[in-house]
Amino acid sequence: MFTKDEWTQEELYKYAKALEKENRHIILIDTILKPLNNIETMTYNPYEMVKMPKGTVFVFYCDTGKTTKERLNFYKAKFPDYVCVSLHGGRGYWRPNFRMQKEIEKNL
């Protein structure tokens, strides 16, 4: 799960369910001031982000996913007590009506 630096939307939902069982949080971090539809996001704010419980997973996104993937090492250095991941394709690949398939939910 944490071996990848970039997650797809499907992986985001799948891992969120798995981490929920461990009582860990995943937070989508908006770096472009454009919230995603049908999911809770948080605007990039380092002062608020460090107040989150240690071990929280921050999933950063931009318009295409390229900028956040390139800046991932910066984010990892800035937030060493947290897991930092980039959202593949960013806002451009986001499907607001995406739902996990029942087969995926069964495999968790």
Image: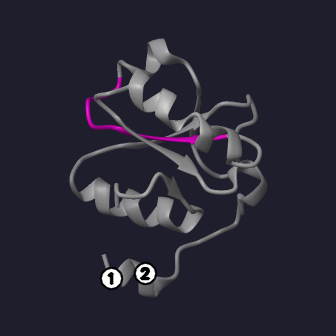
**Residue found 33% across the figure and 37% down from its top:** 56
Q: On the image, numbered disc 1 is attached to which residue?
A: 107
Residue at the top extreme?
47
Give the magenta part as a residue range.
Answer: 52-61
Q: Are marks 1 and 2 in contact (CB under 8 Å)?
A: yes
The C terminus is located in which quarter? bottom left
Numbered mark located on residue 104 in the image: 2
**Residue found 70% across the figure and 38% down from its top:** 35
In the image, residue 17 sits, relative to residue 68, either above or below, namely: below
Between 36 and 89, the residue placed more toward the observer is 89
Q: Is residue 76 magenta?
A: no
Q: Is residue 13 left or right of residue 107?
A: right
Name which quarter of the figure residue 79 lies in.
Answer: top left
In the image, residue 100 sits, relative to residue 89, either above or below, namely: below
Q: Specify how the rendered protein is coloured.
A: one colour
In the image, residue 88 sits, relative to residue 108, either above or below, namely: above
Which three-letter amino acid code belongs to the residue tagged 2? Ile
Name which quarter of the figure residue 67 lies in.
Answer: top right
Q: Is residue 51 left or right of residue 30?
A: left
Which three-letter amino acid code belongs to the residue tagged 1? Asn
**Residue found 62% across the figure and 56% down from its top:** 88
Which element is circle 1 on? Answer: loop
Which element is circle 2 on? Answer: helix
Residue 89's spot in the image, x, y percent? 69, 56
Between 5 and 104, the residue placed more toward the observer is 5
Residue 81's spot in the image, x, y percent? 28, 29
Q: Is residue 59 left or right of residue 22?
A: right
